[in-house]
Image: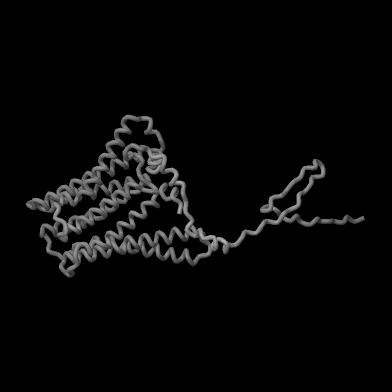
């Protein structure tokens, strides 16, 4: 395991999001089961922390952008800065929705359609952001997630206001369509992994990459689908499981997503105005971490001396006699790895 390569591909933004969502889901399940009696404003603390870091990081990045005009001519700096502004705009709209949810649960006197208004606005903005991201080759997962779920947001708001009396299984039909697509993606990765394993023309690195992708998608999509099915049956009254048991598959998916952030390149360099990779910035800020960043582990080798004796001893390359040049007398020694047997001399007899 190469720690240097592992942390060079680390994506801190996604790690922060998944960590906050994991902590929030734990607090929410405990609150719904009555284990803790906190107010929902306190239960949403991880969400407030996430949004606070986003707004503060964007503010610092904007300040660095404004005070250093020379940075604007560096490569794709303008594209990254615009991507940061789009992301912070969507996060502000999501923050408005979360504040309205807490206020609606605490007071409970206005319609849920009003609460979901920021999400209704997020969806068309996300569609425009996705078009912009595709044109500039940007990865926009949050924007895609918000843009494809607008119909689901409308159904949930209508169900909570009791305008429609459908069961939750029918209300979540848009979600089932999306999860069907994700299941097809999982099946795609599994099939390609099997084909790569059976192929002899594929190097080991490519096989390992496809197997890792297949396992990652399985451990993300399958538990997520299980959580959604359990939650729908819980809301419809078809099972008596506690909310903690219902949320366990979701925690498994979030833990897997947190693990995958160590292999995902990317991340906007304009957050907090650092203008470089997060790990490089951290190593410059804390130089003593460089000693640990250069450590690598070989899990296949053992420190047991008896096991070391069983390892095959590499053969000694054959010694090749030096050759003397006739005119200069310089000794020329050929490399053992590049020695080739000279071809035989070709003798052609000329006729008399």
Where residue 184 appears, x then y in whole percent? Answer: 34, 63
For the C terminus, the image quarter is: bottom right
Looking at the image, residue 144 lies above or below residue 226:
above
Classify 206 as above or below 322: below
Spot occupied by residue 291 in the image (x, y as percentages of width and height) = 45, 44
Residue 59 visible from this viewpoint: yes
Quarter of the image for the N terminus: give it. Answer: bottom left
One can see residue 169 in this view: no
Foreground of the two, 134 or 103: 103
Where residue 73 appears, as percent x and y from the top left, is 39, 33
Residue name at image x 28 percent, y 53 percent: 145
Residue at the extreme front of the image, as rendered: 305
Q: Quadrant of residue 83?
A: top left
Q: Nearer the viewer, residue 326 or 314?
A: 314
Q: How is the image coloured?
A: one colour
**Residue drawn at (43%, 46%), measured in percent from left and top?**
292
Q: Nearer the viewer, residue 172 or 275?
A: 275
In the image as oriented, which residue stretches furthest toward the right? Answer: 352
Q: Residue at point 26% right, 62% down?
A: 248
Name the image quarter holding residue 274.
Answer: top left
Kindly give the residue lying farthest to the left in the view shown.
109
Q: Residue 267 appears in which quarter of the rendering?
A: top left
């Amino acid at each position: 395991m190469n720690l240097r390569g592992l942390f060079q591909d680390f994506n801190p933004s996604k790690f922060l999001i998944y960590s906050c969502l994991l902590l929030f889901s734990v607090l929410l399940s405990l609150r719904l089961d009555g284990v803790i009696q906190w107010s929902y404003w306190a239960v949403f603390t991880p969400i407030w922390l996430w949004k606070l870091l986003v707004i503060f990081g964007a503010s610092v990045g904007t300040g660095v952008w404004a005070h250093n005009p020379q940075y604007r001519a560096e490569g794709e700096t303008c594209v990254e800065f615009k991507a940061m502004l789009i992301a912070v705009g969507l996060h502000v709209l999501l923050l408005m929705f979360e504040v309205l949810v807490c206020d609606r649960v605490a007071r409970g006197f206005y319609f849920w359609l009003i609460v979901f208004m920021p999400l209704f606005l997020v969806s068309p903005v996300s569609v425009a952001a996705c078009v912009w991201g595709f044109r500039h080759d940007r990865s926009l997962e949050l924007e895609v997630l918000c843009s494809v779920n607008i119909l689901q947001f409308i159904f949930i708001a209508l169900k909570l206001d009791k305008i429609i009396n459908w069961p939750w299984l029918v209300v979540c039909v848009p979600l089932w369509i999306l999860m069907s697509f994700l299941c097809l993606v999982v099946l795609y990765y599994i099939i390609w992994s099997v084909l790569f394993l059976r192929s002899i023309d594929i190097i080991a690195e490519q096989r390992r990459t496809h197997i890792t992708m297949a396992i990652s998608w399985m451990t993300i999509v399958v538990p997520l689908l299980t959580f959604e099915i359990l939650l729908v049956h819980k809301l419809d009254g078809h099972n008596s499981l506690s909310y903690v048991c219902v949320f366990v598959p979701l925690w498994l998916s979030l833990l897997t997503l947190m693990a995958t952030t160590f292999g995902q390149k990317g991340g906007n360099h304009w957050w907090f105005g650092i203008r470089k990779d997060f790990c490089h910035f951290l190593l410059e800020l804390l130089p003593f971490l460089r000693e640990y960043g250069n450590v690598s582990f070989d899990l296949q080798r053992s420190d047991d001396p008896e096991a070391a004796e069983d390892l095959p001893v590499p053969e000694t390359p054959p010694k090749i006699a030096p050759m003397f040049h006739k005119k200069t007398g310089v000794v020329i020694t050929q490399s053992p790895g590049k020695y080739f047997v000279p071809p035989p001399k070709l003798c052609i007899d000329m006729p008399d």
